[in-house]
Amino acid sequence: MKKLLFVVAIAVGLMSCNNGTKSTSSSSSSETKSAPSSSISLSAAGSTFAGPFYKTASKQYVNLTGVTLSYGMTGSGAGIRSLHDKVVDFCGSDAFLSDAQEAQMPAPVVHIATCSGAVDIAFNVPGITSIKLTPEVLADIFLGKITNWDDARLKKINPGVKFPKLAMTVVHRSDGSGTSFIFTNYMSKISKEWADKVGFGTSVNWPVGMGGKGNPGVAGTISSTVGAIGYIGSDYAAAQKISFALLKNAAGNYIAPTIAAVSAAGKGEMPADTRIVETNSSDPEAYPISGFTWIILYKEQAYNGRSLAQAQATVKFIQWLLQPTAQKVAEELNYAPLPEKVVNIDEAILKSITYNGKPILQ
Amino acid sequence: MNSEKVTKNLLFVASIILILLAAGMVLTLASGSIPVFEKFGIQFIWSNKWNPTAGREQYGALPFIAGTIITSVLALIICLPLAFSASLFIGEFYKGTFFAKIIGTMVDLLAGIPSIVYGLWGFYYLRPMIVKLGLNAQGFGVFTASIILAIMIIPYATSISTEIISLVPNHLKEAAYSLGATRMEVIWNVTVPAARSGIIASYILALGRALGETMAVTMLIGNDNHIPKSIFGIGNTMASVIANQFGEAEGSKLSALIAIGLLLFVITGLINAAGKFIIKKLA
């Protein structure tokens, strides 16, 4: 018996050693025989909002190149921190870094917009699958002024919908989050009271409501709590079949968070560094709470003893994410693909990334 | 060098390492929390503002201290009758019987269940019950978290007090019986007073465990960074806010979280000291 245990222990030890030495050649060859062998694995962390896109896309990418990606869905805030500590190759974030935040990073960084998505206002009221909301009502719900589904103002904008007498439970994120950033940014634009009292950021001082951790946590809380209302990335609402609200946009139309409506929001001007919040777009077809999600990485890739091959793999993976094949994956997961002009801006930024001062892409 | 000397030196080194570890932890926590105390002063401890928005940053630990103490004390109150009866049952009434052994094993088993499993059970089964009872609209909150905490600390409160109760010398009880005392009189006037300090010690241990519990609480308390409005309201605890926000924290916020960690450490230490004091007084 003891001998057997000993053998098992050795075997386990050997296996773990094998994993420890970055050689993924054995695992990639067993997964797909045709894949070119590569010993590169990328590590990244951040946005739970865009996480499903990066994870699903990287499954295709490993078949093409053998380069694997491990993406930790830690939330944008924690992702940025990991990049700051130089423990990841890139981070995913739904909030771009402000000039002040960029100054706090140990080296210059670049932002690459990868796709855009909507933040759904999800709710759970038995028997009701669709409601309309105006910005004013939405603000008052999250400011704690409307506390029951049986509210006169809700009824007024939703003629025909029979609202039950049911306490409203507001759900928000308990951790730092890019989804919160997009949502609170929108709230600050449409409500002066919100801008004065709360403001916007990856985490704020919520006037009311309870917190769930990550998009999955908020989605789970909403779907298991009768009377709940909250905001989640639209891919989560779609995956968990949670009902969402139609929102009145700046042009006065009630819009569902569809891919087309998010694309419409992204039609506007794009600055050369891609750092823009596209909430409350003036386009008549646009869904108002939508935003780009970014990959952030260092402009100079030779740091912490990273090899040239590692740097090349990082940049090439991101370049591939902008291509139609990968963007199609985004669309399948309910994100809006990038407009062509944004792809062009992204490409130009990627070309500015260097390794020891030399551009990585030619 | 004889083996006695080797052993002695080994033990000495091991104890020194323990002291260094504890001192090192306190030191790092203290140095990490200096920035927040410099910025917000000692008011940090009793300020109830927690605003992480950039440009409006303001941190205060009171909502979390309140949440932690309310949930832990409430959990102890809920757990007391159950734990006390269980320990009397196992240690006195049915001492050594098969039935008592089964109950004892079950209680010990409760201690082995990981915290996340309690949280999951609370989220999917306890929460709907709270809603059905009409205690609050969504089932999250201080009360729900306290019930789960109470179940989690029952084994800590029970097993040591059982042990102490069953160790009460038989000759004491027999003397009481020989004076004509009934069984109830013996329990209330002999067994419980003799085991008093040990029973209280076990409850303090249980309270200490409740103070630091994180995962199950964060899943049920509602994670609202305000002082709970009532015991059925939502709130947050010190351990839970650290678990939720450490990932992206930096600057003042990180320092505030570390300071909360330090305060939790101090509160746990105070409660342990109070426990030791009570035991000494009673013994």
Image: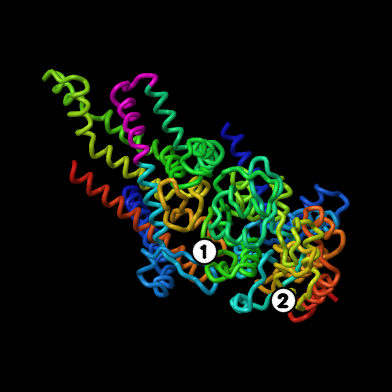
Image location of residue A86, percent across then percent down: 63, 69
The x and y percentages for residue B105 are: 42, 28
**Residue drawn at (51%, 43%) of the image:** B139
The residue range painted magenta reads B77-99
Magenta highlight on residue B85: yes
Q: Residues within 10 Å of mark 1 (few under 14, many from 20)?
A: many
Query: Is residue B71 one of those drawn in magenta?
Result: no
Q: Residue furthest left?
A: B179
Q: In the rendered image, which quarter is residue B62 located in?
A: bottom left
- The residue pinned by badge 2 equals A299
Q: Quadrant of residue A98?
A: bottom right
Tag on residue A6?
none
Q: Chain of mark 2?
A: A
The x and y percentages for residue A104 are 59, 76
Magenta span dominant secondary structure: helix
Q: In front: B40, or A167?
A: A167
Relative horizontal placement of residue A140, taking residue B18 as reference (left or right) = right
Q: Amino acid at mark 1?
A: Asn
User: In the shown orientation, is residue B84 left or right of residue A176?
Assistant: left
Query: Which part of the image, by quadrant, shows the C terminus of chain B?
Result: top left
Q: Chain of mark 1?
A: A
The secondary element bearing badge 2 is classed as loop
| Mark found first going from the N terminus, 1 or 2 | 1
Q: Residue at x 82, y 59 (%)?
A: A260
**Residue at position x 23%, y 31% in the image:** B192
Dot 1 lies on which element? loop
Q: Closer to the camera: disc 1 or disc 2?
A: 1
Q: Is residue B190 left or right of residue B213?
A: left
Q: Which residue is mark 1?
A: A205
Q: Amino acid at mark 2?
A: Lys
Residue A25 seen in the figure? no
B71 or A85, nearer to the observer: B71
